[in-house]
Image (tube, rainbow, N blue to C red):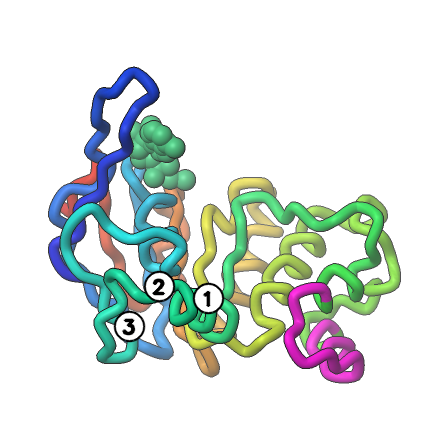
Amino acid sequence: MKAISYSYTEVRGGEILALDNISMKFNSKNLSMVIGPAGSGKSTLLRITGLLESPSSGSVIFANEDLTNPTQAERLNIIRHEMGFVPPYPSLLPYLTILENVMLPMIKKNKIMAIDMLKDMGLENMGSYPNQISVEDQQKASIARALINNPELILVDEPTSSLPQSGSNNIMKLLKKLKNDHTVLTFTDDMKLIKYSDAVFKLNKGVLE
Ligand code: ADP
Ligand code: MG
């Protein structure tokens, strides 16, 4: 990311500068962390990094390719194959089992592979519905869903905000394990998570400290 700025236009016509001239590089096969209080621009940066939105100015480089303003086809292709998103709250579909939830975005359906992956994560209760398992297990399933197409980059928004301390440690240990095969970007306001990271970027009011 080079010199990224992003402004929201308010309904009344005003502009909110959410990101101000941000440059950062996330190394592959690392767990990088963007830390900042609520409103500092983390989720905006996540969406720009994940190609869900283009910046107002600056450039986005992914795997040596300039993807600041990709074509719609390029954007979809990369989002589908190279990006995995984990939202702040698991948000699984309540009427599907854990296994069905995780397989939903799978491009090449492979049930055995999905089952193996969930077992690897310790989610034996994959036939249950989301409201029958703990929030920690739901969060694991949400991570599994993001990983199902083996993306290069996994973007995790507030991974521990809905969890108590013990669950939070378990999820961070899981994310740390993932960096063997993926590049992990975690966005959080929790300073206690720094110890799990390889690189830390501090964001405050849209500015990198
Ligand atoms: P964080 O994830 O760190 O809490 P956000 O990226 O969500 O921060 O928000 C950064 C700033 O942009 C905040 O001032 C927020 O109010 C503003 N913002 C976020 N989303 C919108 C939106 N859709 N419209 C207008 N302003 C927004
Ligand atoms: Mg946010």
Q: Could you tell me residue 147's position as x and y percent?
A: 57, 70
Front-most of residues 173 and 28? 28
Residue plotted at (58% across, 76% down): 149
Q: Write down the region rendered in magenta.
A: 104-118
Query: Tag 2: Cα neighbours inside 10 Å, few (<14), some, or many (≥20)?
Result: some
* Label 1 element class: helix
Residue type, numbered disc 3: Phe
Residue plotted at (61% across, 51% down): 167
Q: Quadrant of ligand 2?
A: top left
Asked whether the viewer can see residue 204, the reply is no
Q: Nearer the viewer, mark 3 or mark 2?
A: 3
* Label 2 element class: loop
Whole-number angstrom distance, CA of label 1 to CA of label 3: 14 Å
Q: Nearer the viewer, mark 1 or mark 2?
A: 1
Residue extending furthest top? 12
Q: Is residue 39 left or right of residue 168?
A: left
Name the N-terminal-most of marks 1 and 3. Answer: 3
Query: Tag 3: Cα neighbours inside 10 Å, few (<14), some, or many (≥20)?
Result: some
Residue plotted at (40% across, 66% down): 75
| Residue that label 1 marks | 76
Whole-number angstrom distance, CA of label 3 to CA of label 2: 21 Å
